[in-house]
Image: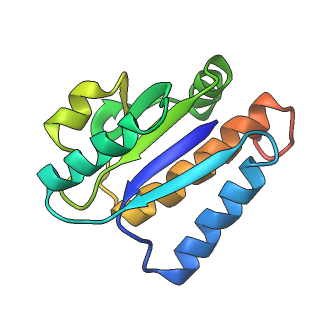
Amino acid sequence: MIRIIAIGKMKEKRLSALTDDFITRASKWCPVEVIELKDSNKDKEGEAILRKLDSFSPGLIIAMDEHGKNPTSRGLAKTLSQHRSLTFVIGGPDGLSDSVRSLANRELSLSKMTFTHEAARFLLAEQIYRGLSINNGHSYHRD
């Protein structure tokens, strides 16, 4: 099971549709759930994330943070293959609270560049699909 906890709704319809498409494609290999939480200030968002994480067994918790490690697609695929349950957490415009970052098992960055949280969700969904396609021998990823 892969979960993505994300602050805020995706307002850009085209980006939301592309994200949903990658989630749907990835779900044929592994259940993928997106949990949207209300945007607020960073501390309130952090409290909401922690409450949500307490409501299920999150497995490996990966905080999406610009200062995290920047793996290759194959590196992410390896992580996906090694864990039965993963939860990725994407903060709002101000990032993740310290309490969420300290609870995470890992911090992962999609790039050295900064993206909107909506773009980060799209990129993460695409990389999850790519990683699962690598693990399942699908031709989507090319070396």
Is 20 placed left or right of 39 in the picture? right
Question: Residue 143, image x and y in percent?
Answer: 74, 34
Most extreme residue toward the top, as rendered? 82
> Does 120 sit above or below residue 75?
below
80 displayed left or right of 64: right
Residue 107 position by quadrant: top left
Q: Give how far across and how far down residue 8 sits, in percent.
A: 35, 66
Whole-percent x, y for residue 102 in the image: 22, 26
Judge whether residue 109 can be spotted in this image: no
Q: In which quarter of the image is residue 105?
A: top left
The spot of residue 67 in percent (x, y) is 25, 35
Residue at image position (42%, 29%) is 61
Residue that extends furthest to the front in the rendered view of this protein: 55
How many numbered markers are drawn?
0
Q: In which quarter of the image is the N terminus?
A: top right
Q: Nearer the viewer, residue 19 or 143?
A: 19
Compared to residue 94, the image places residue 132 above or below, namely: above
Please say whether residue 81 is visible from this viewpoint: yes
